[in-house]
């Protein structure tokens, strides 16, 4: 099939089948059981989990806080910070730090679990779903400091600084109310099948279905380091579409299967207009990405503005987010 390169479809993505994908039955998007719950109701449970045989390992325990972990995190951050003070490789920090603080996943000590899966602890973390990793960071923050977090940000509408300060009548924000998208009842890898509103051609095949999978940590790393020049949403789609079951050429390939040529074909309707496939794909990508909403609702303190917005959590400032209390700067 590598010789098929007419019609604008590249052949470089074609590779031997990945048995971990090709032998699975995809879950129809309409059957996907997703629930949104607040962090304080989630407990020590991962939104997706680690698939181990026929079991999905979701429950986790964390080691009690130790200054040793904080120091280790600080050293990882320092060794990955450039001269301008920018964090060069946040994913490296994440995958090397989390094995220090995770005790068990699915009842198994993390070192034993990695050994059972024939990998290292850092590689185990790297292969976890992005929503599971961010949930672990929120759980660590709650364990170390509780639910209060001091937020400060300028209103995107009027520019007024909104800063949490109980002494000035502005309470701290509540992390425990952050919503988490959880995939329920998983017994297999979350390979999700999207049925498209209309078919499109890939070589001689009419494609009506795509297989998608939530982002993993190593894929988030690729997005951070991407030099493709593509809009970020396209790079994310290229990572999350993992199979095209109606295409002989792209049915069971290893690595990236979705590219610009397929995106063009999918988005162009036979009528010459934007295909409804595009809207269906973007909705599916948004729906199947589990994990926490890593933002806090804020409101403007300017009485003439009264704007409200969603402010990203400063969680990539790892040490400060995890181990410095709300009133550290008082």
Image: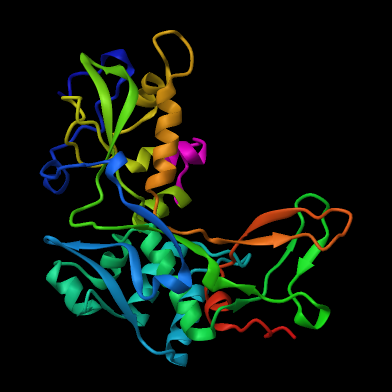
Farthest residue, direction top? 271
Residue 280 in which image quadrant: top left
Residue 17 is inside the magenta segment: no
Q: Which residues are magenta?
A: 225-236
Which residue: 36% across, 75% down?
Answer: 44
Q: Let me know if residue 92 appears in the view.
A: no
The image quadrant where one finds the N terminus is top left
**Quarter occupied by residue 237:** top left
- Compared across the picture, whether 251 is left or right of 166 comes to left
Residue 59 drawn at (x, y percent): 28, 73
Question: At which x and y percent is residue 225?
Answer: 46, 50
Front position in the image: 267 or 92:
267
Asked whether, in this view, residue 40 is left or right of residue 47, the answer is right
Q: Residue at x 40, y 41 (%)?
A: 285
Between 215 and 90, which is closer to the camera in this rendering? 215
How far across and down, in percent of the image, does residue 90 sit? 47, 64
Residue 130 lies, with reference to residue 271, above or below; the image says below
Q: Is residue 202 left or right of residue 309?
A: left
Percent coordinates x, y for residue 10 in the rendering: 29, 24
- Viewer-proximal residue among 237 and 4: 237
């Amino acid at each position: 099939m590598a010789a098929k390169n007419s019609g604008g479809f590249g052949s470089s993505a074609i590779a031997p089948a990945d048995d971990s994908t090709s032998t699975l039955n995809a879950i129809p998007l309409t059957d996907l059981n997703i629930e949104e719950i607040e962090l304080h109701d989630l407990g020590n449970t991962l939104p997706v989990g680690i698939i181990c045989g026929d079991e999905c390992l979701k429950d986790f325990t964390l080691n009690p806080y130790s200054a040793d972990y904080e120091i280790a995190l600080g050293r990882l951050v320092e060794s990955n910070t450039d001269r301008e003070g920018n964090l060069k490789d946040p994913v490296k920090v994440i995958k090397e730090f989390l094995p220090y603080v995770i005790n068990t996943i699915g009842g198994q000590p993390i070192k034993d679990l990695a050994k059972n899966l024939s990998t290292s602890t850092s590689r185990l973390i790297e292969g976890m779903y992005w929503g599971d990793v961010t949930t672990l960071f929120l759980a660590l923050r709650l364990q170390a400091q509780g639910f209060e977090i001091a937020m400060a940000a300028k209103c995107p509408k009027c520019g007024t600084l909104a800063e949490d300060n109980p002494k000035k009548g502005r309470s701290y924000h509540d992390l425990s109310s952050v919503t988490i998208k959880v995939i329920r009842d998983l017994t297999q890898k979350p390979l999700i099948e999207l049925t498209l509103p209309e078919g499109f051609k890939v070589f001689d095949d009419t494609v009506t279905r795509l297989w998608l999978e939530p982002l993993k940590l190593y894929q988030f790393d690729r997005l951070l380091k991407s030099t493709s020049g593509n809009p970020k949403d396209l790079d994310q789609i290229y990572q999350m579409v993992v199979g095209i079951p109606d295409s002989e050429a792209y049915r069971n390939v290893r690595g990236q299967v979705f590219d610009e040529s397929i995106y063009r074909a999918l988005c162009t309707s036979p009528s010459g207009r934007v295909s409804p496939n595009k809207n269906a794909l973007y909705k599916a990508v948004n729906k199947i990405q589990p994990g926490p909403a890593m933002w806090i609702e804020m409101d403007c303190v300017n009485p003439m503005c009264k704007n409200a917005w969603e402010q990203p959590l400063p969680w990539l400032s790892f040490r400060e987010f995890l181990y410095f209390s709300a009133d550290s700067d008082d």
